[in-house]
Amino acid sequence: SAVISQKPSRDICQRGTSLTIQCQVDSQVTMMFWYRQQPGQSLTLIATANQGSEATYESGFVIDKFPISRPNLTFSTLTVSNMSPEDSSIYLCSTGYGGDGEKLFFGSGTQLSVL
Amino acid sequence: RKEVEQDPGPFNVPEGATVAFNCTYSNSASQSFFWYRQDCRKEPKLLMSVYSSGNEDGRFTAQLNRASQYISLLIRDSKLSDSATYLCVVGGSGGSNYKLTFGKGTLLTVNP
């Protein structure tokens, strides 16, 4: 298993600003994932972050809006850029375990509100 | 068909009741299936994996029917602490098996 520390836990931001969310894992992991959970909706995968390579983004998400860093095997950041109220959501980082890495542990999430 | 579709809920049941959640998925090539639990304002946590042979963990039983692309979760003798949102989760296929698709969740409230 893995313990994931995510911060900040919540923030209220002004339109047009950017917020960087950090995730620290207590062990080395190959893949880290960033999800978004909008109010009343299911979790949606934003991107997969592998150490030493560019993140892979899902349809509807682009690097300019959600730049991701993965400098080592225990850490990743997600930046929400040029925020608008539509970006208000919970953002979750996760990493996988199990034979194929498909069982996920999640960080505690970042509740983002954009005014 | 939506990628992962669950009973809309909410479910309100008394303590001790048996409650069943259903879920259907669209990708017939999916290789992995899970139920996650999400408490209010908390992150999702893995409840159990789901196998074709069915699996049981205490009061929880999960079933998978690949032919019908259907997953179920049965909770027996429900407790107040079972109150949460239950997420049906389906893995990808081929090289994308690690990509999980989440259902919207079904809210369960167990009442004293």
Image (cartoon, coloured by chain):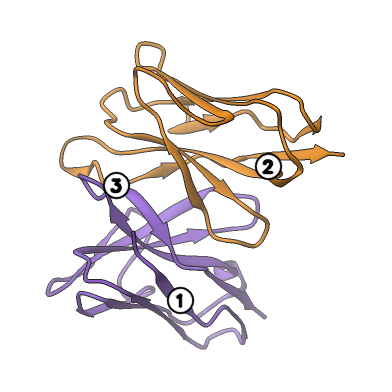
Read off the residue under disc 2.
B82
Read off the residue under disc 1.
A6
Kindly state the secondary structure of the residue where label 2 is placed: helix
Chain under callout 3: A
Q: Position of residue A23 (x, y in %)?
A: 38, 76
Kindly state the secondary structure of the residue where label 3 is placed: loop
Residue positioned 40% across, 58% down in the render:
A105
Residue positioned 58% across, 58% down in the render:
A38
Kindly state the secondary structure of the residue where label 1 is placed: strand
As drawn, is B13 to the left or to the right of A17?
right
As drawn, is A114 to the left or to the right of A20?
right
- Residue type at mark 2 is Asp
- Residue type at mark 3 is Glu
Chain in orange, by letter, is: B
Q: Looking at the image, is mark 1 or mark 2 nearer the viewer? A: 2
Q: Is residue B8 above or below residue A99?
A: above
Q: A89 or B69, which lies in front?
A: B69
List the single residue furthest toward the left: A52
